[in-house]
Amino acid sequence: MNQASTLAALLVALAAGCDDQRPRVSAPAASASPADFSNPSSLFQQEAEHQREHAAERPAPRPAPSSVALSKVARAELTSLHVSSLKDGVMLEKVGDAWQTKYTPRCLVDERMLSAALDNLASLTRSETGQRVISGPDFVLSIVARAGLAKLLVLDVGPATQQGQLMQLGDGSTWDVKGFKPALFPADSRAWCRKP
């Protein structure tokens, strides 16, 4: 890939992040000459100006989730819940007033089961611990609650402790969490399906 096509690909990627209605920069045709990109700094300046123009339109990024419990406000904003284990995973998404699994097998989610899981997330408490969840096999479950793309709650669940369950939060901190009920969070999508 030559320098000109690399530059054009970068500009396409940068432009893809903007939500306005201006025409997008398209990748150059194979016949584009390096002369078409004779002033790359001008292209970068234009993109930087474009990003500054629209910076106020974007919501401020949320800090990494540092809470162990799902607040009432976060629960009201919730649009998806991702539960994954080392072997399986499921994404639940809110569509209108109902919840459904996002991938095969697509089905409507059992509201009582989802409500019990969210109630459990709202009731969690934490205490200091000197332990750490190191890596891969130490994590038995991962739960990510989102409002759109924003992460509201991130819990990487480690092994059980004498006081509860070891968990790493979205900010990287590790806590001993009390009240967590792993049975309410199956990573198999079929377990969440509403029974006929």
Image (cartoon, rainbow, N blue to C red):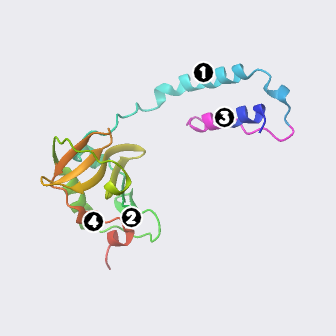
Principal secondary structure, stretch drawn in magenta: loop
Q: Is residue 58 visible?
A: yes
Which residue is painted at 24% across and 60% down in the image?
117
Which residue is painted at 76% across and 36% down in the image?
5
Q: Residue furthest bottom?
A: 196
Q: Is residue 142 magenta?
A: no
Sequence-wise first label, 4 or 2: 2
Sequence-wise first label, 1 or 3: 3
Distance, label 1 to label 4, CA atoms, is 47 Å
189 relative position to 183: left or right: right
- Locate residue 84, reporting x and y percent: 37, 59
Q: Is residue 104 above or below residue 30?
A: below
143 relative position to 106: left or right: left
Residue matched to label 4: 111
Question: Which amino acid type is shown beneath numbered disc 2?
Answer: Gln
Residue matched to label 3: 10
For label 2, count other residues whose C-alpha is less than 10 Å away and answer few (under 14), some (14-19) or many (20+). Answer: many
Which residue is painted at 76% across and 31% down in the image?
3
Question: Which amino acid type is shown beneath numbered disc 1?
Answer: Glu
Q: Is residue 80 above or below residue 150?
A: below
Q: Secondary structure at mark 4?
A: helix
167 relative position to 137: left or right: left
- Locate residue 52, reporting x and y percent: 54, 22
Sequence-wise first label, 1 or 4: 1
Q: Which mark is residue 49?
A: 1
CB contact under 8 Å: marks 1 and 3: no
Distance, label 1 to label 3, CA atoms, is 16 Å
Q: Is residue 23 visible?
A: no
Q: Secondary structure at mark 1?
A: helix
Residue matched to label 2: 100
Stretch of the chain drawn in magenta: 13-31
Distance, label 3 to label 2, CA atoms, is 36 Å
